[in-house]
Image: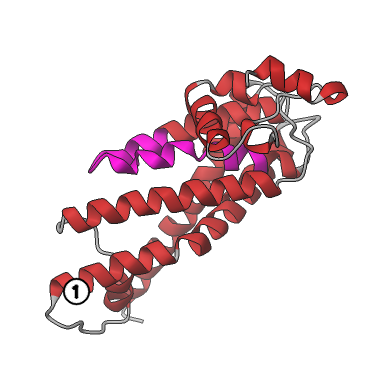
Amino acid sequence: MTTSERREHNGAEDVNLPAWEDPAVPFPANVIETWRRSVLEPGAFFADGPFDRAAVRPILYYLLISILSAGLSLTWGALLPTAQPGFVETLAEIMNVALPDAADAVGSAGRLADFFLTPFWAVLSLVITSLLLHLFVLLLVPGRRSLTATVRTVCYACGPAVFAIVPFVGGLVAWIWGAVLTVIGLREAHRTTTGRAVAAWLLATALPVAFVLLGVVLVIARVASGV
């Protein structure tokens, strides 16, 4: 179903309804069409979107894409034993706990833990990202829409996460592409300029980095002072 057909289907609302939210589009066609348009045609996808609607369906889409991406990463982690350490290994390193010598078993456990924790980390990331973005939208964008519009934008900008299927560079490509989609989505959701949308994204991204750097500096200062 095309965009114009979906608009006719929704009658007076006259909104650019994503296929994922259209009951007339069956599963999995609604997922595929929503992914295709949001990733490859973001300007048309986000334009005139139903930004004031509840974000339940977008959040479900976000979780689905996150789990799919985690599954793809799990596959590559099994095929490439030199991949990044999983949650189990990282936690053990932080707690200074020695793990058994069975490296393969430990690596598999870590990757499985990462996969099963995906919904938790995905929701946490969605909450933090949406709140940070909306904070700077409030500061920079007059006449903005509600937090719901920002949440919907973040959810539908997650499509590039599936590029995790590409080893080594997939994560970087997904991050850059996702950032572009988020900026376009914020611009359309809050009826603002590209410049303001970019500024909101940059500030929301820089704030956590600044806190991490501040923490590192404080730790180094404390170690250096011998406290």
Depicted 81 relative to depicted 7: above or below? below
Residue found at the far right of this picture: 12
Residue at 21%, 74% in the rendered image: 106
| Residue 156 left/right relative to 171 | right
Is residue 198 visible in this depiction of the protein?
Answer: no
Q: Is residue 136 magenta?
A: no
Query: Which stretch is magenta?
Result: 151-176
121, 56: nearer the viewer:
56
Q: Which residue is mark 1?
A: 105
Residue 194 screen position, x and y as percent: 60, 22
- Residue beneath the point at 52% across and 20% down: 41
In terms of secondary structure, what is the magenta stretch mainly? helix
Q: Amino acid at mark 1?
A: Ala
Q: Residues within 10 Å of mark 1 (few under 14, many from 20)?
A: few
Among the 4 quarters of the image, the one containing residue 165: top left
Q: Quadrant of residue 78?
A: bottom left
Residue 144 drawn at (x, y percent): 77, 33
- Left or right: residue 218 versus residue 47 is left
Q: Is residue 168 magenta?
A: yes
